[in-house]
Image (cartoon, rainbow, N blue to C red):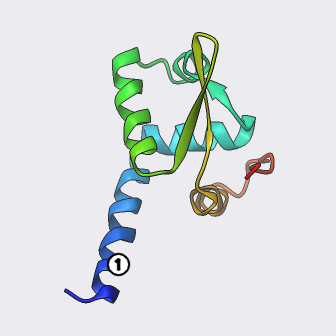
């Protein structure tokens, strides 16, 4: 497999991770609010904590979001500006805050 094929495979895998409705919603919410803790995300999505953790882990593993610990809670924010730009294209009607890099 050549490097061009590998590039397309990596991008396709990245898109597969983003292409889940819950993960789209998580990314959108993090862009809107700039950052959120797990409780805020869980309350917004009304998902069990274990389900939310699985989705957050997939997004973290792909480098799309990052979490930083503040005391007992983890605050999540967007890490990948390409993901933020994609969400802005998919949801142009929503007013987003600028992602801080």
Q: Is residue 10 above or below residue 78?
A: below
- For label 1, the residue is 8
Residue at image position (58%, 56%) is 80
Q: Is residue 33 above or below residue 14?
A: above
Give percent across and percent down for residue 13.
32, 62
Q: Residues within 10 Å of mark 1 (few under 14, many from 20)?
A: few
Q: Which picture quadrant has residue 16?
A: bottom left
Residue toward you, 46 or 14: 14
Residue at image position (30%, 73%) is 9
Give percent across and percent down for residue 93.
73, 53
Residue toward you, 48 or 101: 101
| Left or right position of 6 against 88 | left
The quarter of the image holding the N terminus is bottom left
| Left or right position of 62 against 1 | right
Residue at image position (54%, 37%) is 26
Q: Which SS class for mark 1?
A: helix
Give percent across and percent down for residue 39.
57, 15
Residue at image position (64%, 12%) is 71
| Left or right position of 77 against 99 | left
Q: Most extreme residue toward the top, as rendered?
A: 72
Q: How many marks?
A: 1
Q: Most extreme residue toward the left, as rendered?
A: 1
Give percent across and percent down for residue 50.
34, 18
């Amino acid at each position: 497999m050549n490097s061009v094929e590998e590039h397309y495979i990596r991008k396709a895998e990245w898109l597969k991770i983003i292409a889940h409705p819950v993960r789209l919603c998580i990314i959108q919410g993090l862009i809107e609010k700039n950052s959120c803790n797990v409780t805020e995300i869980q309350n917004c999505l009304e998902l069990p904590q274990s389900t939310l953790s699985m989705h957050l882990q997939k997004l973290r593993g792909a480098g799309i979001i990052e979490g930083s610990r503040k005391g007992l809670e983890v605050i999540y924010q967007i890490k990948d500006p390409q993901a933020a730009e994609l969400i802005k294209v998919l949801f142009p009607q929503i007013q987003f805050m600028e992602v801080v890099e």
